[in-house]
Image (tube, grey):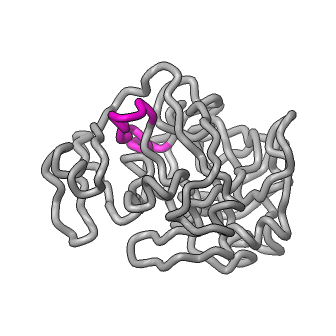
Amino acid sequence: MRAGTIERLRRHPVKSLLGEDVQESAVDGRGLAGDRARALLDLTTGRIASAKHPRLWAGLLGYRAAAALGGEVTITGPDGQRVADDAELSEAIGRKVALIDERPPGAAVERSVPEEVLAQGIDTEVDFTVNELGRAAPDGGFFDFAPLHLITTSTLEAVATEAERYRPNLVIRTEGAGYVENAWVGREVTIGPTLRLRIVAPSPRCAVPTLRHGDLPRHPDALRTPATHNRLVPLDGMPALPCAGVYATVLTPGRIAVGDEVVVVN
């Protein structure tokens, strides 16, 4: 079944920083080349810095990471100026961090309870959980769960928000009502001549989509709308959570480009 076409490809060279569009990319077990290949380690807690805990890390979404062909990553601040090193970034965000490129054993992030963030504000100390990274990404990288995140234009139109807020890798142009990708969970998808994926779970949403992203202002409905219209159980044993988009693992590596056809094969 033809599902749509690739409208945008996005990677985030440093977890929880703003990302960049690419026109084409290799894709393997670590996802889109260069995506979530680095992260900031909080030297106080030993955990990975993530805007999922906005009281501490919402400011990261003012910084942008770009990857060069050789793998070097450049970080620029809200003023557009390049950040020189860990010390400069630590001083700017008010916590000591180190840029790392290997996921430590047991690497975890703190995830504030999204509903409490909405109700009490991003500067309030609210409850949080500690979540291990990459449970469906055994090849490494700093992924919340799986190495690829897909979202459709149908879902973005239903929520009336920008793709950047959900931080997907693949934005797929689709027809029809929102959340069409829910029906792909458990199925295989081919993209372009060789890439083959398995859709493994809906993507539960945290407080991150509601936050300011660069020039994009705060947008609480980016969480409230799926909380009202698309609560799903992402994995067995979890409660129903607001979801938008789906996670995927890579069955057959390949290349992907904007304009490639997306086919759900079984």
Can I make out residue 20 in this image?
no
- Looking at the image, which is closer to me, 8 or 83? 83
Task: Answer above or below: position of 264 versus 197.
Answer: below
Q: Which of 58 and 172 is in front in this view?
A: 58
Q: Say whether residue 191 is visible.
A: yes
Q: Is residue 69 above or below residue 41?
A: below
Please state which of residues 149 and 62 is positioned toward the viewer in this rendering. 62
Residue 41 percent across, percent down from the top left: 36, 36
Residue at screen point 86% across, 34% down: 237
Q: In this view, does 33 lie to the left or right of 146?
A: left
* Residue 42 is a magenta residue: yes
Residue 253 appears at what percent x and percent y? Answer: 55, 34
- Residue 134 position within the rendered picture, expressed as x and y whole percent measured from the top left: 58, 32
Q: Residue drawn at (31%, 47%), measured in percent from left and top?
A: 95
State which region is magenta.
32-47
Residue drawn at (77%, 67%), measured in percent from left and top?
A: 226
Q: Residue 140: x and y, percent?
A: 48, 27
Magenta: main secondary structure:
loop
